[in-house]
Amino acid sequence: MSSSLDSDGLLRQQQQQNLRRQSQQSSDPASAIQVVDLPEADSIATAAALGRQSRSPSLQPLSPANGELSATPSAAAADSESDQAKDESSQQARTPQPQPLAPSDHVSGHPDIRSVQVDFHAYIMDMDLNGRLAELRKTYDKDFDRLKEYQLALHEMVFSSMSHLRALTILQQLFVQHWPAAYKETLNQLGLHFVPDCIALYKSLLASLRGPSLEEFRNSACLLEQFGERLLAWYTADDHVFEFKRLSLSFGFAKTATKRKTSNINEDDIILKLISLRRDNQDFNGFFSRAEAHPVMNKRRFVDLYSVNMQQTMRMVTLLDAAVKKAKKAKSACSFAAKDAENLEACLSIAKDISDYSNNIGVKLKELSRQLVLSKSFSNFWEKSMMDESQVHRFRNQISHLHTCRLYLTREVHMPGLDNYRLRLFVFTEFLLVISESDENRTTKYQLLKHLGEY
């Protein structure tokens, strides 16, 4: 009996000890962790999958029942690579990428554009003319102010030529070089194919005024000596006078002062045609809009550059006239001013001759060209002339720009009994032109009758 009780007692004691041990284990946090055996897989892909299991909709949480992932290891790896690519793409999007230079950006760096100041005051500051001339105050004393005004007048002629060359270069770089091929005829009608000739002429003039290079000109002596002599030598060499006459109206507006109320820049028929083309063709208008938006244009329009050539012809007369007057006043200040005034006066006479030719003969020839080109018989004339294509192109260009040809003489013949009808003969150095004029309803009609050139 007692052994049976002892046996039962020992059994109860063992059960109680087991209960206490289980109770202690359930209260221990470490014993609550469930160990999960994952299937064999790529360790990097698996680690990435585990790291994203709480945010990726393609992956399910671990199941306490089987301890397996619902996605296969290969799918997890593919998803990891996709997310990594997205992250890299997003980072690249946030990092500013260098943009390629626009095709016209080289215009700003062109030496004939970059090195020219916006106005004469900026030129004076850039060249430090006030400081350099001030060094001569002690030498010339009371005559210093007259000497300074004389020298500044010469420098203004240099700057004016530089500024005009800059405008021509912008016109060439932004418009002429990139003009749409489909509208090449309009470019020729506007006379813009003469822009390279104008650039060459003003480069030659500028070289004679300031020396071989701008840098050498900057480093030269304070005083500009023999300025008039150099300019006169340039005017009288290599047919430069005729080149000025030929090119002053080669493009641009040929309108002079008039009392007609209709006189404005839109009076030019070719410009009106250009405006119409821009309005009707989006691509052509886009070409102009992009060019006019370039920083070097400084809010100017194409028509502003189109009109600069004749303006510079007139401005040269004004600048030379001022230089002559100031050189004469500075005679007592320096020994070379008197001779310079004499040479500058001869240059002024030449500049006036060029201006008068442009305003009287050139402008009339240009107007005649426009009338002939716009006449109904103009296109028919070339078809009946039996010329080959190369001759037609050459002669049509001559007729379209009579103001750029060298005129030898002209004659007018009135027909007996025909008061409103007359024949006009134009003898140019390269061809002979015969046209008829008839007055009807207060208008003059022109017809090309004969063109005799070199065959």
Image (cartoon, rainbow, N blue to C red):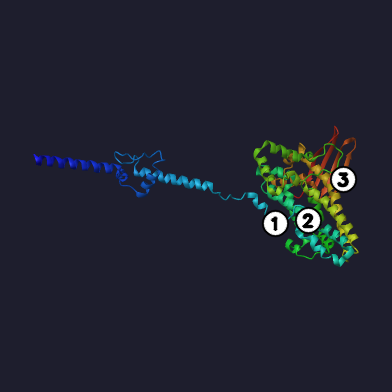
Q: Nearer the viewer, residue 31 or 360?
A: 31
Q: Secondary structure at mark 3?
A: strand
In this rendering, which labeled residue sits more in front, label 1 or label 3?
Answer: 1
Query: Is 414 left, or right, of 403 in this rendering?
Result: right
In space, the residues marked 3 and 2 are separated at their CA atoms by: 42 Å
The residue positioned farthest toward the bottom in the image shown: 139
User: Which mark identifies residue 159?
Assistant: 2
Q: Position of residue 178 (x, y in %)?
A: 66, 47
Relative to 20, is 353 on the left or the right? Answer: right
User: Nearer the N terminus, badge 3 or badge 2?
Assistant: 2
Please say whether residue 395 is visible from this viewpoint.
no
Residue 286, how many percent across, how many down?
66, 41
Estimate the spatial distance between the alpha carbons at disc 1 and disc 3, rounded to whole Å.
47 Å
Residue 441's place in the image compared with 48, above or below, is above
- Mark number, residue 111: 1
The x and y percentages for residue 106 are 65, 52
- Residue at the spot 78% in from the left edge and 48% down from the top edge: 308
Bin the neighbour count of mark 1 within 10 Å (Cα to Cα): few under 14, some 14-19, many 20 and up.
Answer: few
Q: Are marks 1 and 3 in contact (CB under 8 Å)?
A: no
| Foreground of the two, 288 or 66 | 66
Q: Name the amino acid type tagged 2.
A: Phe
Label ID, residue 411:
3
